[in-house]
């Protein structure tokens, strides 16, 4: 399976430096990068005029190589430069282009002629806002991204954050090298990058604790049943129901957990909600409880417990979380079970261990970790800091969901679906995660797998999706994963 490592700008710089120290010249790496860009252009566009916009750094050097390779393949190519090449490798690449170019390279003036536009102005290391002709060119590319192929990242998008710091280009295709950068996965960078191709330019193995979420990350350890499996061996899970008028969320989570493979799923319900729950349940079991002590007793022998979906923000939910924490079961805390600790997050953190999972959306995250998201350069840092502080897995929901573990591992979900913007979808996600944890899957990997399967199921359905559809869509995704394992 392919690597899904995500490297920061600094980590990528170290990978380049290590390759150069091992004997590969910087110019050789630049030749490979520029050729990869040319290959991507040729594979996706009919031969036509190509305008290559080159900045002064090594990103521009990649552009000069791409221009020369395309010209050698019969493409009509023009180059517009923004400043003279400022690095030795970029100067060499520019000279090689000049040796085959019919006319001198012209300065960038913000006007872009028709054709394919190759954006090699500024790469992932950009630290200041674009200005002058570069800003004008970026804004023009943002108006017509279908023409644009970006080298590394669209100009104006910093590689570590994905947050434009001024005018920024948009691309239909981005060609990056060795590994994706955070900007390729985090909003708003992800929307500006279009399709992202990762080109192998011959760098050595690198180590990173950040990955793009996908089956390569967790499928080898997915808890498939064997011929000897039985329902008790496949995990016992409980879901705590809300009051009589707030029971649907728990049922969504319970059904999702059952669909993802948990062997025994029970809804633990307040007495007044037993009848309404009983009227909607089949394979999911049901048991009543009146006090937190009764809840603790009912959950004592389970592998995992979900609490929070429509649980209510009040003392009963707080006491119920405390009771479940005493059982030793792995906890999946969502929604109200997070909010109820807003006045004393440290009380919650003192209960948690590394097997527990918190699944906040941005508002709930702010209640537990006030100011952390705003103070962090991006969501990866925020989620990783939160997981370390809580001592548990944190899944920060969003179109670019980030999952972080207390040991520093982090994954960014890139298959988020707009169809998940519907009431109850988070309850289903909690159920998927809880069902996998109950089967013995390590909690960080269970959260990654649950988030990915959740989004894939939504894409299978598409328009008109409601949360009740999601558990029933999971088997199609699971069948595909089972066949690919």
Image: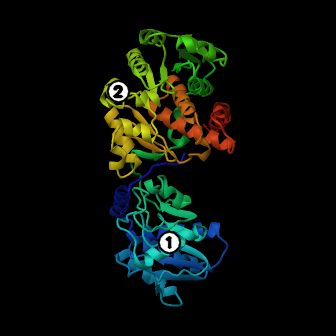
Q: Position of residue 184 (x, y in %)?
A: 48, 56
Residue designated by label 2 = 348
Q: Is residue 179 above or below residue 231?
A: below
Q: Nearer the viewer, residue 360 or 272?
A: 272
Q: Position of residue 332 (x, y in %)?
A: 46, 27
Q: Residue at x 52, y 87 (%)?
A: 101
Q: Is residue 71 above or below residue 37?
A: below
Residue designated by label 1 = 139
Q: CA distance from mark 2 to mark 1?
A: 47 Å
Res. 119 mark:
none
Q: Quadrant of the C terminus?
A: top right
Q: Residue at x 47, y 86 (%)?
A: 105
Q: Earlier in the sequence, mark 2 or mark 1?
A: 1
- Mark 2, Cα crowd under 10 Å, few <14 / some 14-19 / many 20+, is some
In the figure, is residue 200 to the left or right of 83?
Answer: right
Q: Nearer the viewer, residue 291 or 442?
A: 291
Q: Residue at x 63, y 41 (%)?
A: 458
């Amino acid at each position: 399976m392919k690597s899904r490592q995500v490297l920061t700008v600094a980590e990528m710089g170290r990978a380049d430096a290590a390759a150069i120290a091992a004997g590969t010249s910087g110019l050789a790496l630049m030749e490979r990068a520029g050729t990869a860009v040319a290959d991507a252009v040729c594979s996706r566009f009919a031969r036509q005029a190509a305008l290559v916009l080159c900045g002064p750094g090594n990103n521009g050097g990649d552009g000069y190589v791409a221009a020369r390779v395309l010209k050698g393949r019969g493409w009509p190519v023009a180059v517009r430069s923004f400043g003279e090449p400022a690095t030795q490798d970029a100067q060499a690449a520019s000279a090689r282009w000049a040796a085959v170019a019919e006319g001198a390279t012209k300065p960038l003036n913000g006007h872009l002629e028709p054709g394919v536009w190759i954006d090699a102005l500024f790469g992932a290391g950009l630290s200041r806002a674009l200005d002058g002709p570069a800003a004008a060119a970026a804004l023009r590319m943002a108006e017509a991204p279908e023409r644009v192929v970006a080298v590394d990242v669209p100009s104006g998008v910093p590689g570590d954050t994905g947050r434009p710091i001024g005018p920024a280009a948009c691309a239909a295709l981005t060609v990056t090298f060795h590994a994706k950068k955070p900007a390729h996965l985090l909003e708003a960078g992800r929307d500006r990058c279009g399709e992202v191709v990762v080109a192998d330019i011959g760098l050595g193995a690198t180590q990173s604790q950040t990955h793009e979420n996908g089956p390569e990350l967790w499928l080898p350890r997915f808890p498939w049943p064997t011929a000897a499996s039985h329902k008790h061996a496949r995990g016992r899970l409980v879901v705590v129901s809300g009051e009589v008028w707030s029971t649907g969320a728990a049922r969504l989570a319970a059904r999702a957990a059952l669909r993802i493979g948990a062997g025994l799923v029970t809804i633990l319900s307040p007495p007044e909600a037993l009848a309404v729950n009983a009227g909607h349940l089949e394979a999911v079991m049901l048991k009543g409880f009146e006090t937190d002590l009764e809840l603790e007793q009912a959950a004592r022998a389970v592998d995992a417990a979900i609490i929070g979906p429509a649980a209510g923000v009040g003392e009963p939910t707080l006491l119920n979380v405390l009771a479940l924490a005493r059982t030793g079961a792995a906890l999946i805390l969502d929604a109200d079970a997070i909010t109820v600790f807003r006045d004393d997050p440290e009380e919650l953190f003192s209960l948690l261990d590394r097997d527990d999972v918190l699944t906040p959306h941005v508002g709930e995250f702010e209640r537990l970790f006030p100011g952390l998201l705003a103070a962090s350069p991006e969501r990866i840092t925020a989620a990783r800091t939160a997981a370390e502080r809580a001592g548990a897995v944190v899944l920060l929901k969003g179109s670019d969901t980030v999952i972080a573990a207390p040991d520093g591992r982090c994954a960014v979900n890139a298959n988020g679906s707009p169809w998940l913007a519907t009431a109850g979808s988070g309850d289903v996600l909690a159920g998927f995660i809880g069902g996998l944890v109950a089967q013995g899957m390590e909690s960080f990997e269970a959260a990654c797998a649950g988030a990915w399967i959740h989004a894939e199921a939504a894409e299978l359905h598409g328009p008109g999706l409601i949360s009740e559809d999601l558990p029933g869509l999971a088997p199609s995704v699971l069948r595909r994963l089972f066949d690919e394992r």
